[in-house]
Amino acid sequence: MSHEKYQSLIQALHDCMAACNHCFDACLMEDHVEVMRECIRLDRECADYCAYFEQALSKGTPFVSELANVCATICEACGNECKRHEHDHCQRCAEACFACADQCRNLVA
Amino acid sequence: MSHEKYQSLIQALHDCMAACNHCFDACLMEDHVEVMRECIRLDRECADYCAYFEQALSKGTPFVSELANVCATICEACGNECKRHEHDHCQRCAEACFACADQCRNLVA
Amino acid sequence: MSHEKYQSLIQALHDCMAACNHCFDACLMEDHVEVMRECIRLDRECADYCAYFEQALSKGTPFVSELANVCATICEACGNECKRHEHDHCQRCAEACFACADQCRNLVA
Amino acid sequence: MSHEKYQSLIQALHDCMAACNHCFDACLMEDHVEVMRECIRLDRECADYCAYFEQALSKGTPFVSELANVCATICEACGNECKRHEHDHCQRCAEACFACADQCRNLVA
């Protein structure tokens, strides 16, 4: 079953979605929100894509490689942006993004 | 933080989404798919709503009660349909639906 | 067919989703992004909910009233926030939100 | 603005999402639902992806090419499956899928 085979990726996608949404929420409350614009934008994009991909895996999508490939690109972009900010939520988000991107890259390789 | 306060509901929503998507996938492969129509339809509906609500909680939605109320209705409808079928995936899905509905009802109460 | 019966609501949901996403995008580029925090948050929430509800209608959901009821609440909250800002994208978004909320209220009534 | 530049693609995505969801709903009500399994599965996949991509465009995603590329693949797969069935809803869905795939291919080219 697809959802068992991909259990580890599903968990990584879920962790990444949660971290991105938490970072989105926390960035909007930061004092200097003006430097968090790109982080806010990419947090939403990455959370939405990971949520989509996680659902696709759990319903048995035949397009795993194609979706994983794009996911790695989006997670890396979000991780790179988050990594630049010192906030805990950004650093934790960057870790979750890179972990998810790694799993996607491994799957496609 | 919203996402910590609601950790248990987030997990229930996630389990319900995964169970519904697995049931959707498995129902489509059953020999007698003609008796699974309503199960397939409600599995999709419930999975989509739980996925939406889970994301909403993790991004700090101010509409928790309103969303939880509808979630309980959808999860119960899906659980009641799944419960009627003997397949393991349906029985497990019914359990996940009712567990999620309970958490939603408790939250609203 | 559900999707024909609700054609006007589907259009209103779609317009609202598009206006909210445009407003989200434009708010993030405003000079004074620090006063747009709540607008950004509600734009995302409202866009995501309208997108979800639009899909639900087009796939024949049996939960139209329940979903419409919550939709009206979210659209009104987003419209009220947008209305407070002078930016064109905010004013247009407020209009789309209130138009969508009206249709939802009429449906439930 | 992103959402204006891509107006024609946004419309094609929206039409495709609506056609796929209608086909999903109608397939589940067909007498011979057992031959519509793959159509039901791909209708959901294609509707969900088009809905995601449409939202991404309207919120100004920087990943247009990557998302369009995968979209073309999914729309073609769904269109090819729908084309095999004589039902009006399947034929109309195939048309919407191929029209959307064309726009995605043109964008990437």
Image (cartoon, coloured by chain):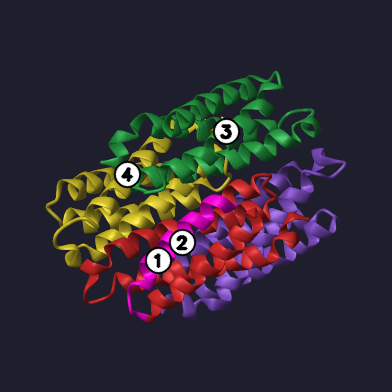
Chain colours: A purple, B red, C green, D yellow
Q: Is residue B47 left or right of B82 when viewed as pictured? A: right
Local crowd size for mark 2, using a 10 Å CA cut-off: few (<14), some (14–19), many (≥20)? some
Q: CA distance from mark 1 to mark 2?
A: 6 Å
Q: Residues within 10 Å of mark 4 (few under 14, many from 20)?
A: some
Q: Secondary structure at mark 3?
A: helix
Give the residue number, with chain letter if any, for mark 4.
D102
Q: Is residue C107 magenta?
A: no
Q: Position of residue C16 (x, y in %)?
A: 51, 31
- Quarter of the figure that contains the N terminus of chain A: bottom left
> At label 3, which amino acid type do we have?
Cys
Q: Which residue is mark 1?
A: B80
* Disc 4 residue type (three-letter): Asp
Q: Which residue is mark 2?
A: B76
Q: Are marks 4 and 1 on the same chain?
A: no
Callout 3 and callout 4 share a chain: no
Residue at the image point whose x is 77% and y is 32% from the top: C33
Q: Is residue B38 left or right of residue B23?
A: left
Number of the label disc, if any, that sits on residue C75 = 3
- Badge 2: chain ID: B
C-alpha distance separating marks 4 and 2: 41 Å
Q: What range is drawn magenta here? A: B68-87
Pointers 1 and 2 in contact (C-beta within 8 Å): yes
Q: Are marks 3 and 4 in contact (CB under 8 Å)?
A: no
